[in-house]
Image: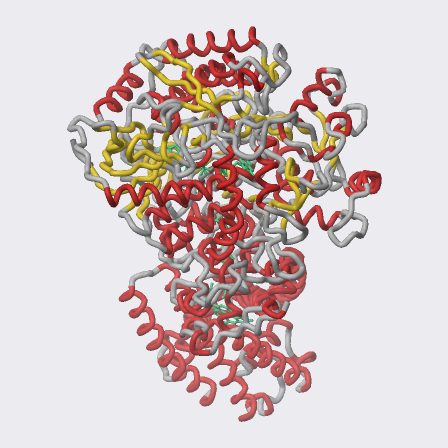
Amino acid sequence: MEVTVKIFRYNPEKDARGNYVTYKIEAEPTDRILDVLEHIKGKTDGALSFRRSCAHGVCGSDAMRINGRNRLACKVLVRDVGANITIEPLLGMKVKKDLIVDMEPFFNNYKKMTPYLVNNSPLPADGRERLQSPEQRARFDESTKCILCAACTTSCPSFWANDEYFGPAAFVTAHRFIFDSRDEGASQRLMVLAETDGTVRCHTAYNCTDACPREIHITQAIGDLKMAMVTGKLE
Amino acid sequence: MGLKRNVPLSAALGYKGQGPFLAFILHRVGGAGMAIFITMHVLSTFAEMRGLAIGDALNKVYTSPPFQIFILFCVLFHAINGLRITLLDIFHAKLMPHYRKIIAVEWVVFILVFGFAAVSVVATAIGRM
Amino acid sequence: MANVHQFEVIVVGAGGAGLMAGLYASKSAQTAVISKLYPTRSHTGAAQGGISAALGNYEEDKPEWHMYDTVKGSDYLGDQDAIEFMCNEAIDAVLELEHMGLPFDRTPDGRISQRPFGGHTNVETGKPVRRAAHAADRTGHMILQTLYQQCIKSNVTFFDEYQVVDFIMADGKASGIVAIELATGEMHTFHAKSIVFATGGHGRIFEVTSNAYAYTGDGAAILYRRGIPLEDMEFFQFHPTGIYKLGILITEGVRGEGGVWINGKGERFMPKYAPHVKDLASRDVVSRAIITEIKEGRGVDGKNYVYLDIRPETVNKFAKEDGRTNPDGSPYNLTAETVLKKIPDIIDFCRVYLGVDPVTQMMPIQPTAHYTMGGIPTNKFGEVVVDDKGTTIPGLYAAGECACVSVHGANRLGTNSRLDIVVFGKHAGLKAAEYAKSAQWTNLPGDADSAARSDFEALRNGSGKVNAYDLSNEMKEVMFREVGIYRTEKDMQSALEKVREMQTRYKEIRVSDTGKIFNTELLNAWELGNMLAVAEVVALSALNRKESRGGHSREDYPERDDANWLKHSLVTRKNGKAEISYKPVVITKYQPKARVY
Amino acid sequence: MNALQTKPRTVPLSKRGMSFETFMWVFTRVTALAMYGFILVGLIGAIAMGALHEMTFVEVIRWALVSNPGHVESTNVQDIAPWASAFWRTVASGMFLTALAHGIHGVIVIVDDYVASASGRNWNRYISMAMFFVVMGAGLYVIWKA
Ligand SMILES: Cc1cc2nc3c(=O)[nH]c(=O)nc-3n(C[C@H](O)[C@H](O)[C@H](O)COP(=O)(O)OP(=O)(O)OC[C@H]3O[C@@H](n4cnc5c(N)ncnc54)[C@H](O)[C@@H]3O)c2cc1C
Ligand code: HEM
Ligand code: SF4
Ligand code: F3S
Ligand code: FES
């Protein structure tokens, strides 16, 4: 089928601002949007730039706005969006070139969450694993799925308003550790989450949950965090 | 180098969020609308009671049907949606997985109440004419 | 020469191997990790199944069994000293990951959960053993995240989105690397005492592949051009379970949970090929079985794919037939919930890309290019070894999929590469730091980046008669068809000639993007050069090896030939030409015997 | 097995992130429920006082929201006295103060969303607090003197 693809283009070395370029190409309904982009780059316009790596939705490289929503280009098929496709960079990040945005602030927010297991107690005497029941493990399973693609954070109206906001992806990371029964750093993370740019800036708009390619129930995870801050219970 | 990160309002409103995103926008419009209205309303009534004439002009605006419908929308949507938010926050573990259904219910309730109110405003307005 | 940096240890690549090396090297030496992708985008994150270690959390298991299975799996081409080392380190490696916070799935009594995986057995009974420690079907993702988190904790210095394009030697020692900063297009030179390559594999030289776009063999090609040999490049693993056409991997864990192979006639065909372990046979065996079924007309609808069936009713039916039991002895019984819980990501892939729900439908499957067994030759400390006498290049290390230790020999067992990257990444990092602490600084040549500069100039100034995208697709197609699962003299000869001819055409490429900032077209074109270099070595090594062994299956030489070919091949570039030499296989405990499952 | 039975994990109050923001988050929800309480009282009272015969739906809503005698002046209510009792003025004041605190804080939240600088956020608080007291004064005057 013939598809019309409208892509946001911005070349920092030439343009003062971005513009849209429309391409018409042949594509299979089962092609990924990423295949479409590769095709355009390979055949029509080599300068078109975007990030990608795994091509099947597990590395988090290619989050972008596809027909007005944040999606991974490698996880949306042409048949999911139809013959008119608009592709734009993520909102609320500096555009470096075409579909490539500046991810630094995003990773900085991630790093604010103490994103590693905190446990200063001695290891089990036999040197074996710290025990954890399947139920305790299940408690934070969802939030371990995050691939740091930034689809959620850049769909959040609070993040659009100001990028000091830690953003849902950072909260998912915090959730991953706070509810891990082996972790002892909950309190230090909760204190950070309680800052002005923390969880209070989440107004349950659910754009994040809707955008997450890993289907993490982000808003619910944020709810867990808010409740933990109020009640202190980490169950 | 790079483009600024600013998200213009048009781009923000153009984001294809789902029901909850719309609810968030309307909740904010409603809350801010009410806050402004209450402030104005209180101050103008106060001014009127203290013998200043500015209150009168404003009162005309308040009683005009379009404004009434607008402010009723703000109040009712904000109140009903606010209840939804509060309940979901408190019982989030149980309710959040069903957020789509809950919002659907919320719209039904809202349309009923607001419809009633709007009809009432219009009927009064016609009655006065 | 602007942009010169100095670090005692430079790690190239931030996948599992690179992060492990960086983490350990940084404990004692000043270290930087350079990666062309953000670390969390590395291909390690795609791995699904698990990481093997004889923890014995469900049933008895021993490192010796693990070693035996690995040796056997490698079709006796693996170096047994390295394999023994790895299998002994395995338990501590996995426990260390757990201590770092890796969220493994758990047994009811709170220990790390394990599942069976192709080729891993209880050597005494010959039955599959639960050896793969797993975290749902995203173990690789968890390893990558956990190691990255630990690097953040230890304040490791990262240069993200810097693509390494050249390796510098001085006085026969590693001296530095040249890298391009993607965001600016600037060339940077890094002066170092130790350099660890951990750039991953080159599976993108094949058309149907489970590998990431980034898998273009950069590390191997860079060193190869600088005269370092590549070992055992003919051995490339084709994974039996790729999603039809796309190549996306369905984890072997599906088979671990009891998934069954079904051909176009609706028959279970694996018992014919592997009467004991049946559907759980090792990868090369299953890949060949599938191709045989397809060739003999039993593919689905006459097409080149078969089904993998994880529907509980099928699984339970055959589990009953096979007398499969749970660890406590009760009959094995799979439920839809277990499927959903154990392989959520796979179910998601099938739904997104195929519109198929594995709980109620069979999955269309085709073998896909998957894993690079060969690579930069190293010993078990990650030191790069350039000949058959154990000569190393001071300061040069390699680990992970780009390296060939060789623990995988002719065929890698599932879950062993996770182990490989963790164990050898760690030791390469330790060795690199140790060496850096004792060694003197080399004199970095003043024009270190000139070669890289002229390479890139050439790509900008070619005649433009050839389109890089088309050339790349052509190479992939040729390699998959002619140097794929089943190989013949004629095909490989033809492939080799075509690849060489493509290397000439490659010089005609002209990159249309003239900018510097994120010029991905330029870098992709450069990567194509690497892939063509590696493809030539793969085709040449494969053509040269006149036997069938592990991942290398020749129709014209269907038997393994230990008399003539129990040796590693090395391809070295001398005066612009590829030359083959050999080195012996280290055999300690297990003498080669026929490999039956 | 014993090591598995971990103690319930609870973070003490001072260490769980009970900041001003968190507190106000709770406050917003508590006031939201409280306002429903006031509305309910207003509604029941209005019905008891015969609103169904004397007021339109919108007029009932207006009264329920803030049960200020001024809010029934333009209706068909015959006898304004019961509606203007001290009880109702107290209810109205309660509702008014709750709504005002909730609303002014809501405005602070909205502005904080967009203004990230420390000084901007401080100004936001000063101005909002000033507004709070001015409107509070005027509002109480209106409720009690009307
Ligand atoms: C789909 C899939 C499933 C798998 N499942 C399993 C499994 O279940 N069990 C198992 O044991 N193994 C599995 N494997 C294999 C295993 O994942 C890989 O072999 C292993 O992750 C390789 O790790 P690595 O650290 O060597 O490389 P990678 O993780 O790929 O890292 C390579 C790094 O090098 C960097 N790099 C590359 N080139 C350059 C350059 N020129 N300059 C700078 N940086 C560069 C990249 O940015 C990246 O950070 C699987 C592989 C795939 C593809
Ligand atoms: C029954 C009545 C009300 C209920 C149930 C209610 C509920 C809520 C809730 C739950 C919030 C928090 C939203 C969030 O955190 O995302 C909120 C915010 C807010 N409320 Fe109310 N509210 C009510 C009345 C009012 C009134 C009378 C005003 C005005 C004076 C008001 C002004 C605001 C404002 C300005 C916000 C901030 C909006 C935002 O952050 O987008 N509310 N309300
Ligand atoms: S939570 Fe989901 S959307 Fe957000 S970064 Fe992680 S994977 Fe992406
Ligand atoms: S979109 Fe933003 S407002 Fe909250 S629910 Fe998600 S973080
Ligand atoms: S390319 Fe990896 S997520 Fe899309």
Classify C149 as above or below C117: below
How many numbered badges does the structure rendering display?
0
Indicate the quadrant containing the C terminus of chain C: top left, top right, bottom left or bottom right. top right
Classify C82 as above or below C145: above
Tell me the residue at 64%/39% (across/down).
C120
Tell me the residue at 36%/38% (across/down).
C35
Horizontal and vertical percent position of residue B115: 64, 62
Tell me the residue at 33%/20% (across/down).
C225
- In this image, B38 relative to C294: left or right? left
Horizontal and vertical percent position of residue A81: 58, 34
D135, D76: nearer the viewer: D135
- In this image, D107 relative to A136: left or right? left
Q: Is residue B22 visible?
A: no
C488, C150: nearer the viewer: C488
Indicate the quadrant containing the N terminus of chain C: top left, top right, bottom left or bottom right. top left
Q: Is residue A183 visible?
A: yes
Classify D84 as above or below A66: below
Quarter occupied by residue C463 = top left
C522, C382: nearer the viewer: C382
Horizontal and vertical percent position of residue B13: 47, 49
